[in-house]
Amino acid sequence: MSAQTQILMVMIGYMILIVIWGLYQGRKVKTDEDYAIAGRSLPGWAAALSERASGESSWALLGLPGAAYATGLMEIWTALGCVIGIITAWAALAWRLRDEAEKYQVSSFTEYIAKKHSELGKQIRVIGSLVIVFFFFFYVGAQFLGGGKTLFTIMKLDPRWGMLITAVFIVPYTIYGGFRSVVYTDVVQATLMIITLIVGPIAGILYIANRPDLYAQSIPAALTKAGPGFISLTGVAGGFGAGVVIVGGFAWFFGYLGGQPQLTMRFMAIRDARQVKLGRNIGIAWTVIAYIGALSIGWIGLAIFGPNGLADREYVMPAVMLELFPPAIAGILITGAIAAMLSTADSLLILSSSELSENIIGPLMKSKKQDPKTALKRSRIVTTLLAFIALGVAYVSPSKLIFMIVSYVWAGIGGTFSVVILLTLFWKRYHGKAVIVTIITGVAFTIIWSVTGMDAKVTSRLLTFFVAGAAAIISTYLLPKKTG
């Protein structure tokens, strides 16, 4: 049996098990609240593993190792920004958001902001939800594209079939079980991801140390041999350019401060304060280990293949696994990359569905009496429609357009809504009119800054947070709070 066939069989077996597990968890969903936020009854360990799997996408297993392979030590700044952001979110925000979700009895991200600023709650629901749904819509499409690319890279499968296969595996359990199914399938996928990020580096370090025929026999030797840019924390940049490199990498920090709805919902869904502490400990430990492992895999790839040994740098993780392990074991570990994309795609899909169903369609149907089963049916229909449209967009839209829009998400959504969440939690004077100004300003600035090419000079991941923050503070003081 060929190596390719063994890997394919492992992947198919894993996907089938995930679908079965997701559908099983969906049996416990009885109400619309169960579907949207798991009844706010998640144990901390499940919320933490789900939050980490959703937060990393294919970044931890393809993107970050690929960047480390291509740039060397410079990528440490990106990892540092992400890790500190995640630690801050779990330590300072998770318990507050859980308590707020319980206090206001909310089932979606925007619903919390709207209820907190109830004087303009309807407007905030509509504006916030439409912005999130629009951008996340393309984000889901990007995950389908990523699945197609990964299957093409590994299996030489037509990317269009790869996209369809990715959708076929995640859509059924997401439609059926909603947030609950998504969370518990994420638990399995986070476990596989962390195994890959632990086992891979350990085996890799031992492997390169005993292979004198490779490009280098250790990570330091590989970085040094690859050139001065690889061994420097700022690449070849110096002076102001070095500062731009550091700030650009570290700027990922700002998107984690409550501004990523798919992650914040995990905090809101935790059962109680004790479970938040458990989740915090697991989430932080997972993050530190995972980021060290992801960087290490990239640098091990450099030692094995050299700086010019791979045509596509994002193939470094699968290439390293195939170099280190027999095909069947490599297939299990490589499936971690697929798992990462599935975790993000299903999370974004159910988040978009909940925003649309709870904050736009639901309020329009308030005049009609709806029992819990009717509301649940509505949510499932909305999820189905969004899944089909997102897949269609991935098929017909140029991949450059989709990834351009996705590039706005971390800054436009993350930076903007981080400001909204932080001020909503910590500044009593902040009000509904200022929330709307913050959202519009942050998203508009990100798009304009990126379209004009200025993002290449100073990243919008940094500037959007401060521009949206300035707009929030100024509008809070200048605009009178609506009463009545």
Image (tube, rainbow, N blue to C red):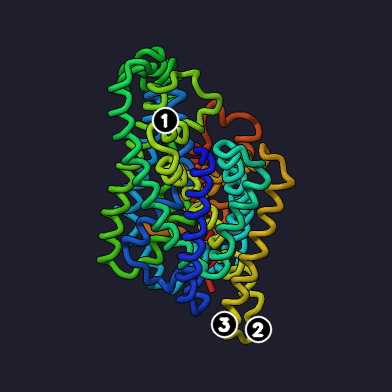
The amino acid sitting under disc 3 is: Lys
- For this rendering, which residue is in front, 206 or 280? 206
Q: Is residue 332 above or below residue 42?
A: above
Marking on residue 323: 1
- Residue at x-position 34% and y-position 58%: 94
Residue 213 position by quadrant: top left
Contact (Cβ within 8 Å) of mark 2 with mark 1: no
Marking on residue 373: 3
Where, quadrant-wise, is the C terminus in this rendering? bottom right
The secondary structure type at the circle numbered 2 is: loop
Q: Earlier in the sequence, mark 2 or mark 1?
A: 1
Contact (Cβ within 8 Å) of mark 1 with mark 3: no
Nearest to the eye among marks 1 and 3: give it: 1
Looking at the image, residue 97 sits to the left or right of residue 70; the answer is left
- Residue at x-position 53% and y-position 36%: 460
The amino acid sitting under disc 1 is: Glu
The secondary structure type at the circle numbered 1 is: helix
Residue 187: tell me if it is visible: yes
The crowd level at tag 3 (other Cα within 10 Å; few <14, some 14-19, many 20+) is few
What residue is disc 2 on? 367
